[in-house]
């Protein structure tokens, strides 16, 4: 278990506005090893509970309160088979996306951590959900109160059948379903501070300040310290306080991979100047520590000692070291950043209340809010302790009492007293203090869940700083027509939030969700509406059913269609026109851009969000107010040149890119090409003859190899093939490269050919005693056998028996070719080189193919293998990791394990439940504004957050660009509509009335009208839609009521005017 050195005090303050005019035997030390869980619960509870109405407000400060006076007699009991405390094996199929964020060591620390979550209203449920999905050892749920009707609007695990049951006990079974590897317990009696010693981290969501200070003092002074988190959401306001102890070590501050650079030169100076190749910009900062390796000449730098740098630039930095007497730099070298642990010293809550220190600012337009909200949460605690209840929603008397208490507290703060205590904000706080709003619970559930992970693992930097919705607006929510695109990790969270918010639950409301994907095992660690028995089922169907179980009044329809141009018959004009709002829950840019264009066209609000590991962002796309999603795009990812990947790799990414390409070529594309030939030999060969190029020649050569020289009929043939592939890839090709370009080769300018970033390769000598060599041969031969339909006996998986077979093989010697052509041009897009005699070679290959086909069994077909990264039993990643690591060994590049290879070659996007929960909570807060309507640009907020740092940046959206002409103005959101099926003349006259002279009108790629063409004047009295049919040959579906034309216009001064798209309605 991680030794917990804690850190200083922490308080987050986030604030958003919505303007609306209308246990005595805790067994949490045990490790869980059982798959099936029996949960028994006996609880007796009585007490006073808080009440919720649909009253809200939002922010975050740092003090908490609770009026729960419940007392319970018994705790829930959970029966489970317990294992010992040995490290639990990580299920890489289940946790692959999470492993990409945390790594194995952090996951092992999580697996050894027991956590207490006290308070099982909406916020507690969200935190528990995220921790269970993360895979901690155990989560104990504590609550002394019973489920009430209003709890159902914020806690997704409760149903009407749970009303009257203890909240913790009622939550256990449904939360346990999320992850059977986590022990989920409930505690329903009054909590004592001694019980906290059973946990590595404790989270309180419903607790008075007095009790919180008592518990925090105990946790702070405990050895080792217990991570203490106090958090709450009150309407639209929320707070988080963290105390991880007097000394807490953060092992990895940001979770990013250490930055590296390829050295080009090092000077013999004091201080020394280090220059790197301009292949990629350096990401170093002044003060970073770095280590050097593989430096030739100045070998003193290769001692592994961390060295501090300064004057960091894009491609150089200064080394704080005298290298005057070092050897002269010759060539090569890698410089790598050294990540340093950081020790934080947290203050206890007792001290933080009076001296909160620096607050973590999230919205830079509200600098004054954090201290005021810190005061507001203290005032609420005092109000509850004095009055015995929360302020009543809308009660002016209660609001005035609350403000008076806040002023009294502020007056006693001395030098820390606030000069401006905003009574209006405090009134809003009081009005909504009783409410638990699900989007707020979801957002803070993500933040707090991540803080617990930090406390248990030392991964990432901890937090180290400290309105009323009326019936009219609720009716808008219930009658909303909402389209959720995608039901993966984001989609599951959105559907849960929408169900709890009451969206689309009215007679006129409808929620449509679509996703064409099916559930896989790796989804279960984040997409919490799915269970293991749902694997293979449609995501949207299962998610919709789960959302309906959260709120039976939800009117939801699940579709399995991909949203795109090919499904516009499903998502037709009427569908888009009737929508109230669109929520994207997608994982690729192209789909996002398509939905963005649809929302622009039909002028619908689009709520956009995305996550990448611990980072998340949200973007509000609001008609006529903000820019659209596609208005700004990230630069395209830099692709390595083809010659680098195939002949001159200098990092493991290049090796894995090559390995993935070879896998697909050998095991998918070539077998598919063979089948295409065998299915219709005449048509296939005619196509190759007609093409007559280098690509056709290469295709035929590969097909012929498969059916002739490299044809496999037995498993031994497959092993031979794998052994010869090893020799070809890792010995012969390298020998040929070194022969063509010797180590001392020079370029045409006289510079060394093998200068950075190129690395001179060395051939590998196969050895059956090298486990990595044998593992590659085993995996490659098994997959080769699969493509030929050859059974694979178990002996092939026995290293000793496989080695015996391989050692008997005779591998022919290799002779380098003098005329071998190796592509070195970085701009080249193909490794195939055209030849004058390609046509002759193709004819010869076709003749040989026909002979080989005659020797095949009737009906013979190969089985192409499509790469599947998420099945560790299929040997796909074994082959790719083997190919990549052997190649890395050729070029002296550090190798990676199979898991890291999977992340890179499988292009796995790192993902964790906490950042997903936060993003969707933020979006759903903006949804209130989007559905309410009538808000200004400055009312909306876009967010970028990084839970690793942590960083929360909230800002107004970018406004849409306005174009003006005379007294007209428009933006990208505008679409000009002309109805009543106009003629071309009527369209031109309509534009002329706006001071615009149209000189060109096109539909699709076809020109309907151009003022320069005399014959186009004959079209003036024809209907525009008829011209589209006759001239543009447009086929107009029956569901389409209009066509769109692009019009080029100029004003009376002959200046071009960029006007909106024009829609011609003909029905």
Image (cartoon, rainbow, N blue to C red):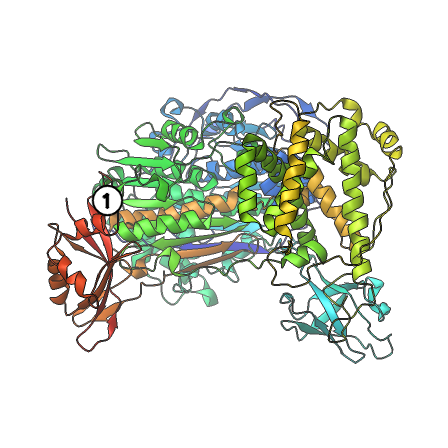
Label 1: which residue? Answer: 577
Between 841 and 11, which is closer to the camera in this rendering? 841
Q: Nearer the viewer, residue 180 or 137?
A: 180
The quadrant of the picture occupied by the C terminus is top left
> Relative to 661, is 40 above or below?
above
Does any portion of residue 992 appear in the rendered image? yes
Count residues near mark 1 (Cα–Cα under 10 Å), then give few for <14, some for 14-19, many for 20+: few
Above or below: residue 425 compared with residue 113: below
What SS does tag 1 mark?
helix
x, y (%) of residue 683?
52, 36
Could you tell whether 546 is left or right of 428 in the image?
A: right
Asked if 1041 appears above or below 521 in the picture, the reply is below
**46 relative position to 753: left or right:** left
Find residue 665 and report its horizontal and vertical position in percent.
Answer: 64, 42
Say which of 320 and 64 sits in front: 320
What count of labels does the image hold? Answer: 1
Q: Where is residue 878? Give x, y as percent.
A: 71, 38
> Left or right: 646 with respect to 761?
left
| Residue 739 image-quadrant placement | bottom right
Percent across and percent down for residue 239 are: 45, 50
Residue 455 visible in the shown view: no
Looking at the rendered image, the quarter that the N terminus falls into is top right
Q: Quadrant location of residue 133?
A: top right
Which quadrant would residue 477 be assigned to in this image?
A: top left
């Amino acid at each position: 278990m991680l030794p917990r050195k804690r850190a200083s005090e922490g308080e987050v303050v986030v604030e958003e506005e919505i303007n609306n005019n209308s246990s005595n035997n805790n067994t949490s030390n045990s490790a869980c090893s059982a798959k099936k869980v029996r949960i028994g619960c006996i609880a007796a509870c009585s007490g006073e509970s808080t009440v919720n109405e649909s009253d809200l407000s939002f922010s975050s400060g740092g003090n908490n309160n609770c009026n729960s006076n419940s007392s319970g007699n018994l705790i829930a009991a959970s029966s489970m088979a317990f294992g010992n405390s040995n490290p639990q094996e990580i299920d890489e199929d289940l946790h692959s996306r999470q492993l990409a964020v945390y790594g194995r060591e952090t996951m092992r620390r999580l697996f050894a951590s027991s956590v207490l979550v006290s308070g099982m209203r909406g916020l507690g449920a969200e935190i528990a959900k995220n921790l269970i999905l993360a895979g901690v050892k155990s989560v104990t749920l504590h609550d002394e109160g019973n489920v009430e009707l209003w709890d159902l609007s914020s806690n997704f695990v409760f149903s009407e059948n749970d009303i009257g049951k203890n909240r913790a006990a009622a939550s256990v079974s449904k939360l346990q379903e999320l992850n059977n590897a986590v022990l989920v317990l409930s505690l329903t009696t009054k909590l004592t501070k001694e019980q906290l010693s059973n946990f590595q981290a404790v989270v309180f969501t419903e607790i008075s300040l007095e009790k919180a200070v008592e518990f925090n003092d105990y946790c702070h002074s405990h050895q080792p310290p217990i991570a203490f988190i106090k958090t709450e959401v009150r309407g639209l306001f929320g707070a988080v306080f963290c105390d991880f102890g007097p000394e807490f070590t953060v092992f990895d501050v940001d979770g990013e991979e250490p930055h590296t650079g390829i050295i080009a030169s090092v000077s013999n100076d004091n201080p020394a100047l280090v220059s790197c190749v301009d292949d990629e910009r350096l990401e170093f900062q002044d003060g970073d520590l770095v280590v050097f390796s593989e430096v030739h000449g100045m070998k003193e730098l290769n001692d592994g000692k961390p060295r501090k740098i300064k004057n960091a630039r894009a491609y150089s930095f200064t080394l704080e070291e005298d290298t005057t007497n070092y050897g002269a730099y010759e060539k090569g070298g890698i410089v790598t950043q050294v990540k340093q642990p950081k020790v934080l010293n947290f203050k206890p809550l007792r001290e933080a209340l009076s001296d909160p220190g620096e607050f973590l600012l999230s919205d830079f337009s509200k600098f004054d809010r954090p201290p005021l909200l810190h005061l507001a949460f203290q005032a609420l605690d005092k109000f509850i302790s004095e009055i015995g209840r929360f302020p009543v929603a809308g009660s002016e008397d209660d609001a005035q009492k609350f403000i008076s208490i806040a002023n009294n507290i502020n007056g006693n703060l001395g030098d820390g007293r606030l000069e401006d205590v905003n009574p209006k904000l405090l009134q809003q706080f009081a009005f909504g203090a009783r409410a638990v709003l699900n989007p707020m619970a979801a957002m803070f559930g993500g933040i707090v869940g991540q803080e617990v992970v930090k406390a248990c693992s030392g991964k990432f930097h901890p937090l180290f700083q400290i309105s009323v919705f009326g019936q009219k607006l609720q009716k808008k929510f219930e009658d909303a027509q909402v389209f959720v695109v995608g039901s993966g990790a984001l989609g599951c969270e959105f559907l849960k939030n929408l169900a709890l918010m009451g969206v689309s639950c009215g007679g006129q409301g409808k929620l449509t969700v679509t996703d064409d994907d099916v559930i896989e095992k790796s989804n279960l660690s984040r997409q919490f509406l799915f269970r293991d028995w749902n694997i293979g089922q449609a995501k949207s169907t299962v998610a919709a059913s789960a959302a309906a179980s959260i709120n039976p009044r939800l009117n939801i329809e699940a579709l399995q269609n991909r949203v795109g141009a090919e499904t516009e018959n499903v998502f037709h004009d009427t569908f888009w026109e009737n929508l109230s709002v669109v929520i994207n829950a997608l994982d690729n840019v192209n789909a996002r851009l398509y939905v963005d264009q649809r929302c622009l066209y039909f002028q619908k609000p689009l709520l956009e969000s995305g996550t990448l590991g611990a980072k998340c962002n949200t973007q509000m796309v609001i008609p006529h107010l903000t820019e659209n999603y596609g208005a700004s795009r990230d630069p395209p990812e830099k692709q390595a040149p083809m010659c680098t990947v195939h002949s001159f790799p200098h990092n493991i990414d290049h090796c894995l890119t090559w390995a993935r390409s070879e896998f697909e070529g050998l095991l998918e594309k070539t077998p598919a090409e063979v089948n295409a030939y065998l299915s219709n030999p005449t048509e296939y060969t005619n196509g190759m003859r007609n093409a007559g190029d280098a690509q056709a020649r290469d295709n035929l050569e590969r097909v012929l190899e498969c059916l002739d020289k490299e044809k496999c009929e037995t498993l031994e043939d497959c092993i031979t093939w794998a052994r010869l592939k090893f020799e070809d890839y890792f010995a012969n090709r390298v020998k040929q490269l070194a022969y063509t370009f010797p180590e001392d080769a020079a370029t045409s300018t006289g510079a060394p050919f093998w200068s950075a970033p190129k690395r001179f390769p060395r051939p590998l000598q196969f050895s059956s005693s090298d486990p990595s060599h044998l593992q590659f041969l085993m995996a490659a031969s098994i997959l080769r056998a699969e493509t030929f339909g050859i059974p694979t006996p178990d002996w092939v998986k026995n290293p000793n028996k496989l080695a015996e077979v391989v050692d008997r093989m005779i591998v022919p010697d290799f002779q380098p070719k003098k005329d071998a052509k190796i592509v070195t041009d970085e701009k080249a897009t193909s490794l195939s080189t055209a030849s004058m005699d390609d046509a002759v070679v193709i004819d010869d290959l076709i003749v040989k193919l026909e002979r080989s086909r005659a020797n095949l069994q009737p009906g013979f077909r190969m089985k192409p293998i499509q790469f599947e990264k998420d099945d560790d039993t299929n040997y796909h990643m074994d082959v790719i990791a083997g190919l990549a690591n052997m190649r890395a060994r050729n070029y002296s590049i550090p190798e990676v394990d199979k898991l890291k290879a999977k992340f890179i070659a499988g292009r796995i996007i790192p993902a964790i439940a906490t950042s997903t929960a936060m993003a969707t909570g933020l979006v759903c807060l903006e949804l209130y504004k989007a559905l309410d309507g009538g808000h200004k640009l400055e009312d909306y907020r876009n967010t970028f957050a990084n839970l690793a740092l942590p960083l929360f940046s909230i800002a107004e959206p970018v406004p849409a660009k306005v174009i003006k002409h005379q007294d007209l103005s428009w933006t990208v959101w505008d679409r000009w509509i002309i109805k009543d099926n106009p003629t071309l003349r009527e369209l031109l006259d309509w534009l002329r009335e706006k001071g615009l002279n149209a000189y060109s009108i096109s539909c699709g790629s076809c020109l309907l009208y151009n003022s320069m063409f005399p014959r186009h004047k004959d079209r003036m009295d024809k209907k525009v839609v008829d011209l589209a049919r006759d001239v543009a040959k447009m086929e107009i579906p029956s569901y389409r009521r209009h066509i769109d034309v692009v019009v080029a216009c100029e004003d009376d001064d002959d200046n071009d005017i960029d006007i909106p798209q024009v829609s011609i309605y003909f029905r």
